[in-house]
Image (cartoon, grey):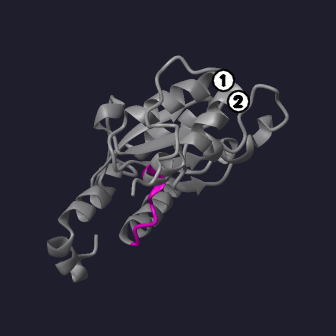
């Protein structure tokens, strides 16, 4: 916590609240789940970093995606992301969400998760240790401070791009677009 910069709390209390109270929802597949439970136990104690697990995306502002992403799970990831309120942040945990990891050549593996939803940060490794989550969280704090953790804004601005990529892989999505797909015309 930035105790020596207490004035920031008074100038931007909303930003500070988002920064230090991250309600995390985890999407764990395969080996990705192995490193998450230790993070919320007393040994590493995620709550001291302001990271608290929640049960529903409607209450979350941090989406931690661990392990490989298959075509089938991509749909659930997109739905979960779209249910989260703004501002929301996404961290890809492990090599698999970054480039497919050891499943890189599988027909069913999604490589480059950031083509389908915006990702604010990556934690590389196969599997990264629990300490890496805290390194990722403290880096996310820096991005929030510098207003660089803005994936949720990019999702709105470039929604057509993301939706097209989603539908290339998943086919026509059965839910309505979250944002308009047409370009807005300037009215003069």
Residue 35 appearing in the image: no
Point out the residue furthest to the front here: 188
Q: Nearer the viewer, residue 182 or 22?
A: 182
What residue did someone put label 2 on? 168
Point out the residue furthest to the right here: 105
Dividing the image into 4 quarters, which one contains the N terminus?
A: bottom left
What residue did someone put label 1 on? 170
Q: Quadrant of residue 147?
A: bottom left
x, y percent for residue 98: 68, 48
x, y percent for residue 23: 32, 44
x, y percent for residue 141: 39, 65
Question: Would residue 82 appear left or right of 58 to someone viewing this image?
Answer: right
Residue 114 appearing in the image: yes
- What is the secondary structure assignment of the residue under circle 1? helix
x, y percent for residue 86: 33, 46
Question: Would residue 132 appear left or right of 72 to someone viewing this image?
Answer: left
Q: Nearer the viewer, residue 89 or 22?
A: 89
Question: Label 2 near label 1: C-beta < 8 Å?
Answer: yes
Whole-angstrom CA distance, mark 1 to mark 2, is: 6 Å
Dividing the image into 4 quarters, which one contains the C terminus?
A: bottom left
Residue range of the region highlighted in magenta in the rendering: 146-152
């Amino acid at each position: 916590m930035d105790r020596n910069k207490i004035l920031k709390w008074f100038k931007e209390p909303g930003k500070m609240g988002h920064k230090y109270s991250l309600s995390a929802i985890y999407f764990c597949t395969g080996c990705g789940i192995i490193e998450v439970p230790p993070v919320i136990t007393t040994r590493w104690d995620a709550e001291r970093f302001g990271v608290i697990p929640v049960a529903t995306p409607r209450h979350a502002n941090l989406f931690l995606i661990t392990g490989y992403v298959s075509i089938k799970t991509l749909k659930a990831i997109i739905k979960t992301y779209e249910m989260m309120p703004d501002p929301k942040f996404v961290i890809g945990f492990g090599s698999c969400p970054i480039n497919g990891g050891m499943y890189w050549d599988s027909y069913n593996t999604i490589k480059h998760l950031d083509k389908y939803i915006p990702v604010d940060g990556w934690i590389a490794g196969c599997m990264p240790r629990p300490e890496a989550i805290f390194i990722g969280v403290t880096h996310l704090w820096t991005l929030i401070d510098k207003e660089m953790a803005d994936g949720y804004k990019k999702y709105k601005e470039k929604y057509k791009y993301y939706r097209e990529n989603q539908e290339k892989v998943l086919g026509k999505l059965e839910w309505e677009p979250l944002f308009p797909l047409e370009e807005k015309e300037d009215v003069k």
